[in-house]
Image (tube, rainbow, N blue to C red):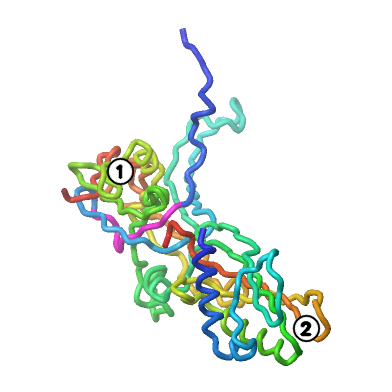
Amino acid sequence: MPSYSLLNLKTLLRAVGRGSIWYDTGAFPGTGNDLDLTHLGDTRGAITPAATYNLSELKVRELYGESPLEASAAGPAVDLTFEIWAADKELVRNIIQPVAGAPGGTFRPRPVTEYTLVVFPEKLFIEDDVQVAVAYTTAGGWTVGGDAASSDQEEMIKNALFFWRGYWTEPAMPVYQYDEGGESLFSATFRAMPNLNMPDGNVVYTAGDPADESIEIAAA
Amino acid sequence: MRWDNVVAAVVTAVNADAALSTATGGETLKPWSASADIEVPALRYEVAENVPGESTELIGINIAYWITGMSAAATVERRLIRVLHNDEWRTLGGVYMATLHRSTTPTADPDPGVVHRTLSFHFQPVREKYT
């Protein structure tokens, strides 16, 4: 006999908090390679991933109306949008660029410059208001500040997003103003691309710990 | 919480300004206190607001001055703005932050001939966990 009971609302996870964005140049070569990540910069406001599928629906309107009898989904296409402080000329000129090394336009179209992008919950890197390093080894798993990740920290890693290949849709440009201390905030969009080196089900992105999907992001 | 770092930076920068010191006859910037009388000339500050943001923290500091005569008042005010305002983020007293003069408001003059005005500044360093 099936039995149904409510979840305990007091223990439901409801918040993730601020994210931090990390990048590596080039698409990730596949499991068993070191994923070396650099912190992209400081963001303000929400880091929002938006995923869409191309849906193909078989409808038998004479019988079932608009309710699809069968459907298949292709995708997802994911855009990650966020606002980043873009005052650092290295970030503006060389990193957030559809075509690296040619920030001001080219004579002919060029292939985009590919990146691997990871969003971690920021609190993973801060223990008792002190910033710590996060590391991963195939043998030992995740460590935070040199110690094995606690169960809370393992939960935070489950809220990480790994985009295995993608590009920036617009070049970052500085914003000029007097107000707000002259702050330069740029709206960046990272568009994920399929990475065929990744296992089925993780071709565009992996949510959570890649090891749970048999993806090792370290050589050892 | 970074107002203590910011206050230290502000007090050091203001007290180090030679032109301001000359205009006020060597008066230094002190915390505003309800229990102590004001003797003209005087410079007082108070931390008026402290708003934690996402990765930065906004700290509003009001600096009030009392001085005799308009031309001395203009000098004091101009020097305070010169020392404490910058269009871009910068390092002041070891703290990297935005330093902005937001407004100046006249306050009731305590005595004839004394100019008493309050300058409002915004300081915006990154939050403590990122320092």
Mark 1 — residue? A210
Q: Is residue A26 magenta?
A: yes
Look at label 2 and name its amino acid.
Val
Q: Main secondary structure of the magenta part?
A: strand
Residue B31 location in percent, x, y? 61, 69
Q: Please report the residue visible at 24 percent of the width from the left and 42 percent of the height from the top.
A: A141
Tell me, yes or no, whether the two marked residues, 2 and 1, touch with CB atoms within 8 Å: no
Res A133 → quadrant = bottom left
Would residue B5 be found to the left or right of residue B35 on screen? left
Q: Is the residue A101 above or below the residue B57 in the image?
A: below
Would residue B127 be found to the left or right of residue B123 on screen? left
Residue A124 location in percent, x, y? 38, 48
Residue A86 location in percent, x, y? 47, 70
Q: Badge 1 sits on which subunit?
A: A
Q: Please report the residue visible at 51 percent of the width from the left and 23 percent of the height from the top.
A: A7
Q: Residue furthest right?
A: B112
- Label 2 packing within 10 angstroms: few (<14), some (14-19), many (20+): some
Q: Is the residue B110 above or below the residue A116 in the image?
A: below
Disc 2 is placed on an element classified as strand
Q: Residue furthest top?
A: A1
Label drawn at residue B114: 2
| Start-end of magenta stretch | A19-29
Q: Nearer the viewer, residue B88 or A78?
A: B88
Distance from label 2 to label 1 (Cα)?
70 Å
Disc 1 is placed on an element classified as helix
Look at label 1 and name its amino acid.
Pro
